[in-house]
Amino acid sequence: MDRRGFLAGLLASGAVHPVWAEGAVGLAPASSPFPRRRGDGGAVSVRPASAEALIRAAELGGVTGFAVADAATGVVLEAGSADVALPPASVAKAVTAMYVLDRLGTGHRYATRLVATGPVEGGRINGDLILVGSGDPVLNTDHLAAMAATLAERGVKGISGRYLVHASALPNLPLIDADQPEFVGYNPALSGLNLNFNRVHFEWRRGQQGYAVSMDARSETLVPPVRMATMRIVPREAPLFTYEAGAREDRWTVASGALGKGGARWMPVRHPQVYAAEVFQTLAKSHGIDLPAASDVDELPAGSTLVEHLSEPMAPILRDMLKFSTNLTAEVVGLTASGKATLPASAELMTAWASERHGLAARFVDHSGLGGASRITAGDMVRALVASHATPLPGLLRDVGMRDEKGKAIKEHPVRVLAKTGTLNFVSGLGGYIMPPSGRILAFGIFSADVPRREALQLAERESPPGGEGWTRRARILQGRLVDRWARLYA
């Protein structure tokens, strides 16, 4: 579809007002937000290269679709291949944020509780103690430590019954995307009780007697050891890791040939409720509270809440999700908003919402963008951003900054770029808002993808594919140049 056809399609949908942007020159501002060159008597007059020329110079192969519009009016200023559906990667998190804000609002909080089924008598709970999750995606070790300290302050030293864990508020899913390598920390399990983004810290050091290995749930202040996740070093060169799921354990092996002198990385946790329960047991012990090994319970027994930890409100949770691109947070908030029992069903509901609310023809297979089968067009992305420009969304997006010719952020630039990035193998996206001093906000979306090259990768190549780093670097430079072009011409 050509640019005129794309604009006509938006008009037919009612997404924009009937104002045509026939040429960049006619719509360029009388003055530029960019610094004048030495000796210039007026605004910068050098016309940026065309979008098509910039795309050709990037040498990405595949398809690059883009669109930019006036966020206040919806008038499309420039577009190319804007009707081609491409993988959004983590730019999908911006749509998830729109969805969650609409369904749950900015003030929603998650509660993690310690519930007793009997009274506290003589320093002991006369009954069971239950660690109850509601899905909090940002619960960490320090939060559990504070809960253990509060329980101790209430005089609890032990229990007469069972130590139970309830994680049924959300579905228990072993991973987000089955097409990812099983050892990557950004593809963990999901449940109604999550801890440290469901990752465990693996560290190794080589000594005279071989390697010393540790697995822990470290925070900024504490390093509680973890037993439910184990790592065994095996004399081999490949594969790098293997995984075996126990009933309540994660059993890993690692190739000795890849370890070197020492190092560390975060591994995904596949039994998150077991992980959280064990870490709390360890932290409780440090406060003089003896707890037996935990057991799962699906139906929450009646009882009284002794301790409650509340998460931050949804707005800062979403802000951090968009800033750090945390997949677990995106999936958890999406599942919370949908109430569905599976990730595909939850993503399908968000897809339906996007269609009904914004007229999008997108398809989402998850809420994070990790799944490569999700699709959205640049035109649809811009349509959603235009519709959301007066909501809390822009204030939650990170300022990724204007970029120089090498793709590096330009410090103290007068133009802000509030946007969400997205990267998969041979997929790169950027969508958000250009915020110039003039006050004319632009909504834009850029998606580049070489899908055949991506689909040809073997599983072992997916963590670091040949040519992937260079491709991603060129894609990001292209995004910076397109944003620079639009800021100069239209802002």
Image (cartoon, rainbow, N blue to C red):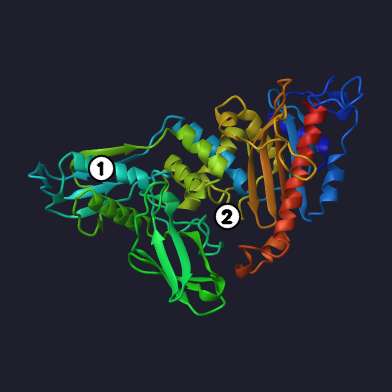
The residue beneath circle 2 is 371
Disc number at residue 181?
none
Category of crowding for the residue at label 1, using alpha-carbon neighbours closer than 10 angstroms: few (below 14), some (14–19), many (at least 20): some
Q: Vertical placement of 378 versus 423: above or below? A: above
User: How far across and how far down the image is residue 337, in percent?
Assistant: 45, 40
Q: Secondary structure at mark 1?
A: helix
The kind of residue on which mark 2 rests is: Gly
User: How far across and how far down the image is residue 297, in percent?
Assistant: 25, 54
User: How far across and how far down the image is residue 100, in percent?
Assistant: 49, 36
Lateral position of residue 282 relative to residue 476, left or right: left
Q: CA distance from mark 1 to mark 2?
A: 40 Å
Lateral position of residue 404 relative to residue 373, left or right: right
| First in sequence: mark 1 vs mark 2 | 1
The kind of residue on which mark 1 rests is: Ala
Q: What residue is rendered at 50% in x and 33% in y?
A: 101
Q: Secondary structure at mark 2?
A: loop
State which quarter of the image contains the N terminus. top right
Observer-nearest of 2 and 232:
232
User: How far across and how far down the image is residue 411, in percent?
Assistant: 70, 34
The mark lying in front, picked from 1 and 2, is 1
Observer-nearest of 291 and 41:
41
Confirm whether residue 78 shows in the render.
no
Category of crowding for the residue at label 2, using alpha-carbon neighbours closer than 10 angstroms: few (below 14), some (14–19), many (at least 20): many
Observer-nearest of 241 and 174:
241
The residue beneath circle 1 is 149
Observer-nearest of 177 and 277:
277
Confirm whether residue 29 shows in the render.
yes
Q: Could you say which quadrant of the image residue 481 lies in?
A: top right
Q: What residue is rendered at 42% in x and 42% in y?
A: 336
